[in-house]
Amino acid sequence: MKKVGVAILGLGVVGGGTYKILTEHEGYYRRTQDIDLVVESVLEPNRDRARALGVPEERIASNIAEVVCNPDVNIVVECIGGVTVAREYVLAALNVGKTVVTSNKELIAKYSHELERAAKRQNAGLYFEASCVGGVPIIRTLLDGLQGNRILTMTGIINGTTNFILTKMAQDGLSYEQALKEAQMLGYAEANPVADVEGFDAAYKLSILASLAFHTKVPYTKVFREGITELREEDIADGKRLGYTLKLLAIAKQEHGGIEVRVHPAFVKSTHPLASVGGSFNAVYLTGDCVGEIMLYGRGAGELPTGSAIVGDVIYAATHGESRYSTFKNNASAEKDTKFITDFKSAYYMRLTVDDEAGVLSRITSIFGRRNISMREVFQRKDEGTGKATLVIVTHETHELSVRSAVSKIEALPFASVESVLRVIA
Amino acid sequence: MKKVGVAILGLGVVGGGTYKILTEHEGYYRRTQDIDLVVESVLEPNRDRARALGVPEERIASNIAEVVCNPDVNIVVECIGGVTVAREYVLAALNVGKTVVTSNKELIAKYSHELERAAKRQNAGLYFEASCVGGVPIIRTLLDGLQGNRILTMTGIINGTTNFILTKMAQDGLSYEQALKEAQMLGYAEANPVADVEGFDAAYKLSILASLAFHTKVPYTKVFREGITELREEDIADGKRLGYTLKLLAIAKQEHGGIEVRVHPAFVKSTHPLASVGGSFNAVYLTGDCVGEIMLYGRGAGELPTGSAIVGDVIYAATHGESRYSTFKNNASAEKDTKFITDFKSAYYMRLTVDDEAGVLSRITSIFGRRNISMREVFQRKDEGTGKATLVIVTHETHELSVRSAVSKIEALPFASVESVLRVIA
C-alpha cells in the first residue's frame, strides 16, 4: 500500500478540520482508497492548539524548513490564509517539489500564475478545490466532469456570510446592521466583515471559477463588484411582494468572444433554484452548451465541509499519477486577448421617492424611453402626509450604462430622488 | 499533441449526441484539453443514420471486429443499450485492451464484476458516468470529489420519465394514465414504459451509485422496488394540502454496518430542495460525514446532457494516465459480508375508507398503538351520501414491517379498507 505523508500549515478552523478528518479516517482511506495517508507534520505557531487536537509533540514543526525538508512529507496543505506568509510557504513547498493543497482563495486569485510556474518547474501538483464554495466539488466538476462543455454562464451564491445576512433580513425583517450583528455573534461573520460584505471574497472565488470555466485568466481586478452594506429592508420587502428574493450573486458569462464577471446583490425569481439557497448554504448554477442547466448545492464554509474539499484534493493528488495545471492550460497569457464586457445587460429594480403630483410619472418614463429602457412593472404608493410617493419600477433587460445614465438624469430632477437600484436576474 | 481515437457503437439518441459533441468540439478540445479527439469509427446497423450525421463512409464499420482491431481506436463508446449485444461488444473491446465508456446502466448494474475483471486484466479503463443521472457528474463527484467522506445517505430523483409523469399529475391534476400518455407523446416515455414506471431503471442506477458510495457491491436485486403505476391523483392532492410533494425516490443509507436501498414513491416536504426538482430534471441529495448535505441537480437524460457525461469520461480517460476501478476496490467479494436492511424505517401516509360511525377511529388507532406506531396527523372527511368517510393518517417514523402488519390487520376489518399507503421522507 502506498504511503503518503501530509503536512498541514495552520491549525485554525479549516486546518484543524482537515487534521481531524485525516486522522479519524485513516483506516477508512486504507480500505477504500488503498493509500496510507499520514499527517507527518503540522506547523502552527500556537503549539497548544496543536496539542489540543492531539498532534504528537514530535510532529509539531518549529518552522517551514522543517516541513519542506521532511522527506516523509509528500503533500503540503496550506490553511494559513492571507497572502504574505502563505505565499512564501507555498512557494517554499512547491520549489522543493512538494504538492500543495490550499483553501486560500485570495492567494490563488492573486498569485496563481507565479504558483503554477513554480509547480510546473518541479512537476509538483497545485490543488485548490477548497478555495471555492467549501465542500462543494465545483472545481473538480469543471475540470473532470463538465470539461466536454463550453461553459456559457455561471451564477453562484458563493459567500456564506452575506447569504446568511440576506436570509436573516428577508425572513426576520432585520436591517443590515442587525443581521450583521447576529452573523458576527454566531461566528458567520468576522469582526471586520469587509472582505465578505463588500464582495471581495466572492470576487476572488469568481475569478478562480471563471478562469477555469473559460480557460483563460480572469483577473479578480476585472470583476465588477458591489457589496451588500447599502441594502435596505424596504427593498427586500418590495422584492418579496413582486416574487423576488435578494441574493449576493457572482455571475460569469462568456459570449461573442467577451467575458463578463460581476458580484453584486440581485433579485432572483423566488421560484428559481437559487432563491431557496438559504442561510450559510452556497450554490453554483451553470449552463453548459451540452449539459444544459446544472446546479451544485452545499455548505460553503465550516471546518468539516471545507476540510472535505481539502482531503478530496489530497486523495486525488495521492492517487492520480500526474499533476494537472488546467487553470490556464495553453493560455498562460490569454488574458491579453480577452475582451471583458463592462456594459453588461440586466433587468433592473428601482425605488424612487417622487413628489405626489400629476406629470411626474410621465417625466420619469420619458427619461427611460429615450434610453430604450422599457418597463415590465411599475407601482406607486402614497407616503401618507408627506406629499411624496414611492415609485417602484422593474425594467426589461437593458444595458447597465443606460440605467446609470437614466439614474443620474432622474437624480438631477427637483421632484424625484433615486433610493435604490438593484439588478434583477430574469 | 496527443491523438486519441474514439469509436461509437450505436448511433441512437445518446450515441448520436456523443458524435455531434465530439465532432463539433474538436478544436475546442485541442485548445482547452491539449488532446486531438477524433471519431475514427462508428458501428451502426442503420448506415443511413450514420450518413445523416455526416459520418464519412470509410469510418462506418461493418462489424465489431473492424472496430476493436482498428489500431487507431483507443476508446470505445457503447451506446447500444440492453445486455446481449452490448455486453458482447464491450467485452470484445476490453479484451483487446481498449478503454470502454458506456451509458448502459443495466449492463453495469448486472455485469460490472465481469467487465471490471476483463478491464483489469488488460489494464483498460471502464467508465460509466453517463449511466446515472444523465449530464450530472455524480459518479465523478463520488469518486474524485467526496471521496474523503463516508457517505451516510443518498436520496435521488434519478428517473426523468417518472418525474415528468408525477410533475404533470401534481401540476395539472392528471391521472397516471393521462400523464403517461402525454409523456409518451412527448418522447419522455417509451411505448413500453415498464422499465421506467416500475422503477427498474432507477434500481439499476441506485445499485451503481450505492456500490460506489459505500465501497461494496450493492446488487440491483437487493433494491426494494415499487413503481408509480398505482398512484392516485387523490393522494397527490391530499399530500399537497399537507405540504408534501410526491416523487419517485431512490434512497440508499448506510448505518450500523447495514445498507438499505430502495426505490419507491414518497412524499417529501414541499420546502425540501428535492421537491422543486420538476419535469425531466434529476437530482441527487447526499449526506457525507464531513461535507454534510450536498445536492447535484441537472438534466437526467437527452442526447446532449448524456453525451456531455460520455465525453467527460472520454476526455478523463484520454488525459489521465492510469485507469481506476474504484467500484469495488479491495472489495470484490464484500457483498457476502454486507448486511442489507429490509425492515427499514420511514414515516407513512395512509388513506383509508371507513364506515362513518362512532368507534371506528379508536379501533384503528388501537391497531397502530399496539405496533408502536404513533400518529403525527389525522384528518377525516365525510364522503357525502355513502355512509363512508375518508381517513388520512400521517405517522411518525416507524418500521416498514410494523406498518405492513397494521395494514393487513385493518384490511381484515369489516368497516375499513386501505386505499393507499405511501412513505413520507421526514
Image (tube, coloured by chain):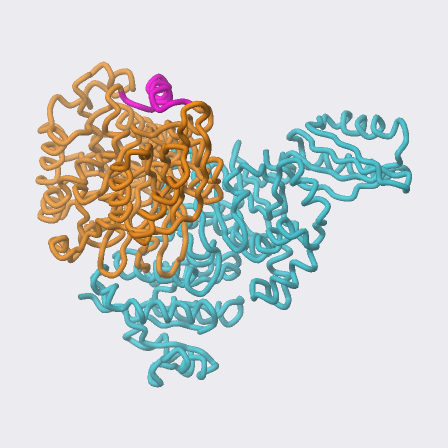
Chain colours: A orange, B cyan
Question: Relative to B398, is B216 above or below?
Answer: below
User: Who is closer to the viewer here, B233 or A107?
Assistant: B233
Residue in the image at 27% along x and 30% along y: A196
Residue in the image at 34% along x and 18% along y: A181
Q: Magenta includes A110? A: no
User: Magenta part of the protein: which range?
Assistant: A174-190
- Horizontal side of A52 relative to A67 (left or right) equals right
Whether residue B218 is visible to the viewer of this picture, yes or no, is: yes
Q: Position of residue B120 (x, y in %)?
A: 36, 58
User: Who is closer to the viewer here, A31 or B236?
Assistant: B236
Q: Quadrant location of residue B5?
A: bottom left
> Residue furthest toward the top?
A48
Q: Quadrant location of residue A77?
A: top left
Whether residue B148 is visible to the viewer of this picture, yes or no, is: no
Residue in the image at 19% along x and 42% along y: A220
Q: Magenta includes A187? A: yes
Question: Relative to B169, is A241 above or below?
Answer: above
User: Who is closer to the viewer here, B374 or A245?
Assistant: A245
Residue in the image at 62% along x and 36% along y: B243
